[in-house]
């Protein structure tokens, strides 16, 4: 006999009712439809290697890109090279087990030439032949530049530009005094290199990895084919009224941005606006990658995982980018809004810094448009979105962007399909109700995806999960945007989800209320009530 648990049905219906009342706002500029139903054009004008890994396939020494983390172990001393105190002091070879002090981030100069950055941000440095290596340089130059030779396995030699090889001395120092050219046997100039992480695959890694000319060719082919007019036709046909378009700060310096970035993205952004206008779709321009990186991730074009955006120079340059974008597109009929910054990190970017930047960015947009929506993104990490409601950043057409993923957090690691869906209906719905009711900006779920940590999810599980998100996020007062249109990982790919009926937008109305059969879970069967349709579902 089936046992049904509906203890929280009444609460959910009350929340639903409040969402409908508090979220009863019509977004201006959408030609009669009340809210944004959007899709992100991720991985197009800002590169994220995990979206299309093949972009990086032909880079020589492709596992030694900018930001790759390496460790070196002397084959004679059987100890690891370490920057004492994580940098700022001397370099020794005396650790049995590698940790953060023994891990160095690569700055790639060429296929075999690198600079090595410590945990503390200093660079390994050597004054020349006969000198020891230290970790005190705050910025790299020729003394901080090393050639790394690799064998076919995991052994390396490290030498200076003069040709002198580093070696592990008997006193546990790293010195530039090896006599002659070492072989690959167990000698003092040979080290075992471990690549501890190679996770950054963004614009910086692609351009610096290939070099300018090859990178320009790779990106030209990618930009011209990844998103086309036919994609806008597809989106329009399936009820999408908005695209959120991530851009990098270097777009404002097109066609010749600073190295290693590659120009040309501005013309494709212009194309997107033309295609959008042709298919009655609106555009949100999203500053996804700011100078210095606002979160240390590949999608903000970080060189090595550092967050170096919060400086006066970088913030001023970011505001110049907003000025450039606003002045260029403010009068375009396809513009819906400008997002001032994507996902600043709560751990490295203070609230005061973000609020000041958002306030200045808001005023810049208003210099060119009184109606364009100004979108401000919640800090990622340990940050409450209510902090932006209390900041009084702007007075009209301002939107807070939240990114809802049932991923990237230990909380979601072991949830079942039912538990994941319950979380959407209970926790996220409650937060949206509170934000919709707050006296302040509109609410935008600017990124979400029909994916989770569950490895054994059935097609029906995915369909139910997608429907739950569409129903709950549809109550956000500004609307939502899926991440992303195209992706090598199929559940992240909006087009794949639509074509295979994992997402069914035609079954979700504009005024979302959650039906009773969806709220009532079968505890015995661990499944939701029957989906609206199973036709066409593919595993």
Image: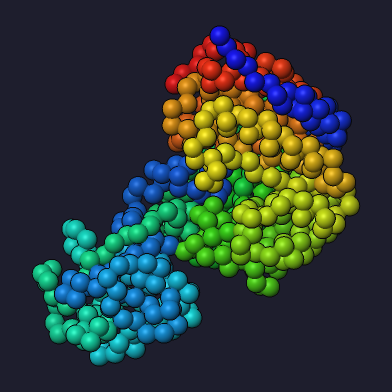
Is 203 positioned to the left or the right of 13 in the image?
Answer: left
The image quadrant of residue 100 is bottom left
* Camera-nearest residue between 235 and 254: 235
* Camera-nearest residue between 333 and 530: 530
Is 53 positioned to the left or the right of 522 in the image?
Answer: left
Quadrant in the picture for the N terminus: top right
User: Which residue reaches farthest bottom?
Assistant: 130
Q: How many marks?
A: 0
* Camera-nearest residue between 284 and 392: 392
Residue under the image location 18 percent in, 58 percent down: 152
* Camera-nearest residue between 300 and 452: 452
Q: Against 366, is 473 above or below? A: above
Rendering coords of residue 238 (x, y %): 65, 23
The image quadrant of residue 69 is bottom left
Rendering coords of residue 461 (x, y %): 53, 23
Residue under the image location 57 percent in, 20 percent down: 523
Quadrant in the picture for the C terminus: top left
The answer to whether residue 393 is visible is: no
Is 214 positioned to the left or the right of 129 in the image?
Answer: right
The answer to whether residue 46 is visible is: yes
Residue under the image location 58 percent in, 59 percent down: 295
User: Which residue reaches farthest top?
Assistant: 1
Rendering coords of residue 247 (x, y %): 61, 51
Residue under the image location 75 percent in, 27 percent down: 12
Q: Against 308, is 269 above or below? A: above
- Scheme of colours in the image: rainbow
Rendering coords of residue 136 (x, y %): 43, 84
């Amino acid at each position: 006999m089936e046992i049904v648990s509906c203890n929280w049905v009444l609460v959910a219906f009350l929340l639903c009712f409040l969402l409908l009342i508090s979220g009863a706002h019509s977004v201006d500029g959408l030609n009669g439809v009340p809210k944004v139903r959007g899709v992100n054009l991720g991985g197009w004008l800002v590169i994220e290697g995990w979206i299309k890994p093949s972009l990086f396939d032909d880079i020589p020494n492709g596992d030694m890109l900018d930001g790759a983390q390496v460790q070196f172990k002397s084959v004679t001393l059987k100890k690891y090279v370490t920057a004492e105190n994580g940098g700022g002091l001397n370099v020794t070879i005396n650790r049995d087990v590698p940790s953060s002090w023994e891990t160095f981030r690569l700055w790639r100069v060429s296929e075999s030439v690198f600079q090595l950055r410590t945990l503390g941000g200093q660079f390994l440095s050597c004054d020349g032949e006969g000198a020891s290596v230290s970790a005190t340089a705050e910025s790299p130059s020729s003394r901080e530049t090393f050639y790394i030779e690799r064998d076919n396995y995991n052994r390396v030699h490290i030498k200076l530009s003069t040709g002198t090889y580093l070696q592990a001395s008997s006193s546990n120092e790293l010195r530039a005094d090896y006599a002659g050219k070492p072989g690959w046997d167990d000698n003092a100039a040979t080290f075992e290199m471990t690549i501890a992480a190679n996770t950054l695959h963004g614009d910086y890694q692609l351009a610096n990895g290939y070099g300018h000319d090859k990178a320009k060719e790779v990106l030209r082919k990618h930009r011209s084919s990844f998103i086309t007019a036919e994609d806008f036709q597809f989106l329009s046909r399936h009820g999408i009224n908005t695209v959120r378009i991530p851009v990098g700060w270097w777009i404002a310096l097109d066609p010749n941005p600073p190295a290693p970035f590659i120009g040309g993205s501005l013309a494709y952004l212009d194309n997107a606006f033309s295609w959008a206008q042709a298919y009655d779709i609106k555009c949100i321009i999203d500053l996804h990658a700011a100078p210095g990186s606002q979160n240390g991730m590949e999608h903000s074009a970080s060189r090595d995982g550092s967050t170096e955006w919060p400086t006066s120079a970088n913030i001023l340059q970011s505001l110049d980018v907003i000025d450039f974008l606003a002045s260029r597109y403010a009068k375009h009929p396809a513009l819906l809004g400008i997002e001032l910054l994507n996902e600043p990190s709560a751990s490295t970017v203070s609230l005061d810094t973000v609020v000041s930047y958002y306030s200045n960015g808001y005023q810049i947009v208003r210099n060119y448009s009184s109606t364009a929506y100004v979108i401000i993104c919640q800090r990622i990490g340990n940050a409450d979105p209510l902090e932006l409601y209390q900041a009084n950043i702007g007075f009209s057409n301002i939107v807070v962007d939240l990114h809802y993923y049932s991923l990237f957090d230990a909380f979601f690691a072991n949830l079942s399909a039912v538990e994941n869906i319950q979380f959407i209906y209970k926790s996220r719905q409650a937060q949206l109700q509170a934000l919709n009711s707050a006296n302040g900006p509109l609410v935008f779920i600017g990124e979400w995806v029909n994916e989770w940590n569950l490895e054994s999810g059935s097609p029906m599980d995915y369909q139910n999960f997608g429907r739950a998100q569409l129903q709950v996020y549809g109550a956000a007062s500004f609307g939502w945007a899926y991440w992303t249109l195209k992706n090598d990982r199929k559940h992240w790919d909006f087009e794949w989800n639509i074509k295979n009926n994992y997402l069914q937008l035609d079954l979700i109305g504009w005024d979302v209320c959650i039906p009773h059969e969806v709220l009532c879970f079968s505890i015995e069967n661990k499944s939701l009530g029957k989906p609206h349709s199973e036709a066409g579902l593919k595993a």
